[in-house]
Amino acid sequence: MLKYRRILLKISGESLAGESGYGIDAGVLESFADEVKEACDLGAEIALVIGGGNIFRGLSTAAASMDRVQADYMGMLATVINSLALQDALERKGIYTRLMTAIKMEQIAEPFIRRRAVRHLEKGRVVIFGAGTGNPYFTTDTAASLRAIEIEASVIIKGTRVEGVYDSDPEKNPDAEFFPRISYFDVIRKNLRVMDMTAITLCRENTLPIVVMNMNTKGNLTRLLKGDQIGTLVHTGDE
């Protein structure tokens, strides 16, 4: 029995870049695909949202003077590029996938339709949600929260390169305090950088738990699904 049956895995675009800091690292892509395959083999239903920072933040100097809406649409297209790369990596491992986008681009992806997405999951396909919410001014964190609620996921798993939630950046502060469990309210009150405030509020209003964990540690995802205490659980405070 899995602790979490249907999950939404949120991965940052920067995590795909590996050590280079930009672009897509083939080794990282392969590693993520292996983790997802292991989870699929356990019987988990998996949806994915990936950011576009590895592509778009390389253009940040140019974007600084751009119209915000125009820049946000460029960021949405960057998430589709990453989604296509991840789809290819998963399918090379024999995993059936569907890429669904919030902006119509029928030649490469299906438009997002909630009932169709749920049906894909029920059939054992990995569903990748690209292009954010399709609206400017909303991040991929918010898109992940929204899609997770729509497909009735039991948890959002945010894959990072640190072990979970800390009171400060553990990569800069070796004395940073780690939180194995924390409430939505405390995340907001302490202004912790778990997800943006819109995403946290959505999860809080819909009592959707968030697990923040190190995606670079092999086997973390499957151990979490089996019920091990991995990373940080963000919850209502009543658990």
Image (cartoon, grey):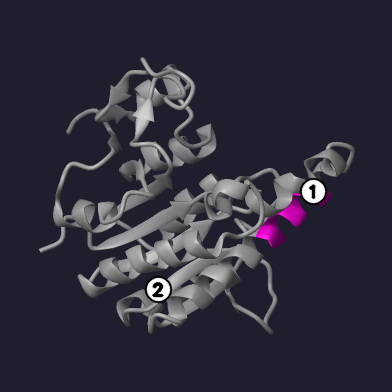
Q: Nearer the viewer, residue 62 or 172?
A: 172
| Residue linked to disc 2 | 126
Quadrant location of the C terminus in the rendered image: top left
Position of 200 relative to 108 (above/below) = above
Quadrant location of the N terminus in the rendered image: bottom left
Query: Residue at position x 29%, y 35% from top?
Result: 232
In which image quadrant can residue 66 be found? Answer: top right
Principal secondary structure, stretch drawn in magenta: helix
Task: Decide if residue 209 is on the left or right side of residue 114.
Answer: left
Task: Decide if residue 210 is on the left or right side of residue 104.
Answer: left
Q: Nearer the viewer, residue 38 or 226?
A: 38
In which image quadrant can residue 5 be found? Answer: bottom left
Q: Which residues are magenta?
A: 70-78
Query: Residue at position x 75%, y 55% from top?
Result: 73
In percent of width and height, residue 143 lies at 54, 52
Can you name the residue that lies furthest to the left here?
A: 1
Disc 2 crowd rating (10 Å Cα; few below 14, some 14-19, many 20+) is many
Task: Decide if residue 136 is on the left or right side of residue 180.
Answer: right
Question: Considering the numbered disc 1 on the image, is that residue within a helix, a strand or a loop?
Answer: helix
Query: Residue at position x 54%, y 51% from top?
Result: 18
Task: Decide if residue 26 is on the left or right side of residue 30.
Answer: right
Query: Residue at position x 48%, y 59% from top?
Result: 28
Q: Nearer the viewer, residue 80 or 172?
A: 172
| Residue linked to disc 1 | 71
Residue type pointed to by label 2: Val
The question of residue 109 being in magenta is answered with no
Q: Which mark is residue 140?
A: none
The question of residue 73 being in magenta is answered with yes
Give the distance between the C-alpha atoms of the residues marked 1 and 2, in whole angstroms: 29 Å
